[in-house]
Amino acid sequence: MMGSMKLLGWGCTLLLLSPVTYGSMARPAVLPETVINVRFYDVSAPDLKSLAAALDRVAPRDQDKVALGKASYRLDWRLELDQGEKQCLVRQIVVSTDATLLIPRWLEKTKATKQDRQRWERITASLLDYEARHKEMVLQSATRIGIALADLPAESSCDVLRYGAWKAGMKELEQGQRRIDSFQRQTRYGEMLGLRWPGEG
């Protein structure tokens, strides 16, 4: 049984999902998997003022809106089930987190003035901070999915158990999406964390 979450942002930092462990040996094993794909898009401009216009041309777009960077996440889960004579049990759970990141790279940064370099570094630091918080919430959702699936009781059939797993996983995905939506509103999509388009603020 699988589910998915997709989140769009301005950039991202990297952190591998830590193994999930439980005190009880009776719980099924929860195995995390994390795959990170990082890509850079190049932007060429002699100074920060010109950089804003250059980004307008080459930066990624989502629903016709230009973004400084982009991050998409996908959460999946897979179950290994054991059908006995009277009941079906979860033996193992794999929770996968896949991330694809697109980050800007200013080609002329080393040739720019010290002031422009510092301003660009503040912008990119804010971008990474904003997406680091997204990442933390996504990984929290992955952990919660693993716990929720590990807590599933045995059922009379594996079909019933799969359906229960789907409902439990989707519930955690929806709650995670609500947390992210709330964070985006509270920070004005990173503006409250200092995230600005070059040339603004």
Image (tube, grey):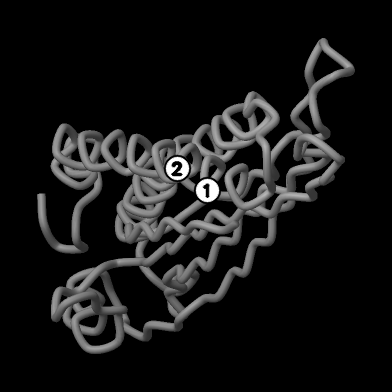
Say what amino acid the circle numbered 1 marks: Tyr
| Mark carried by residue 167 | 2
Please tell me how crowded label 2 is: few (under 14), some (14-19), or many (20+) other residues with Cα within 10 Å.
some
**Is 98 on the left or on the right of 171, as rendered?**
right
Q: Is residue 72 left or right of residue 16?
A: left
Q: Residue at x 72, y 50 (%)?
A: 79
Q: Nearer the viewer, residue 42 or 199?
A: 42
In the depicted structure, whether residue 59 falls above or below residue 191: below
Q: Looking at the image, is 176 positioned above or below residue 104?
A: above
Q: Amino acid at mark 2?
A: Lys
Point 20% across, 47% down: residue: 189
Q: Residue furthest left?
A: 201
Q: Helix, strand or loop at disc 2?
A: helix
Residue 41 vs residue 89, the one in the foreground: 89
* Left or right position of 128 against 163: left
Residue closest to the far front: 85
Whole-percent x, y for residue 26 in the image? 85, 19
Q: Which residue occupies 45% across, 68% down?
A: 103
- Labelled pair 1, 2 in contact (Cβ < 8 Å): yes
Residue sitting nearer the eye, 137 or 194: 137
Q: Residue furthest top?
A: 23
Q: Which mark is residue 62?
A: none
Q: In the image, residue 55 lies at what x, y percent?
A: 25, 79
- Point out residue 190 in the picture as x, y percentages from the top left corner: 23, 44
Q: Nearer the viewer, mark 1 or mark 2?
A: 1
Q: Which image quarter holds the N terminus?
A: bottom right
Q: Which mark is residue 163?
A: 1
Q: Position of residue 15 (x, y in %)?
A: 64, 44
Q: Secondary structure at mark 1?
A: helix
Q: Residue at 55%, 61% (x, y): give it.
A: 99
Q: Residues within 10 Å of mark 1 (few under 14, many from 20)?
A: few
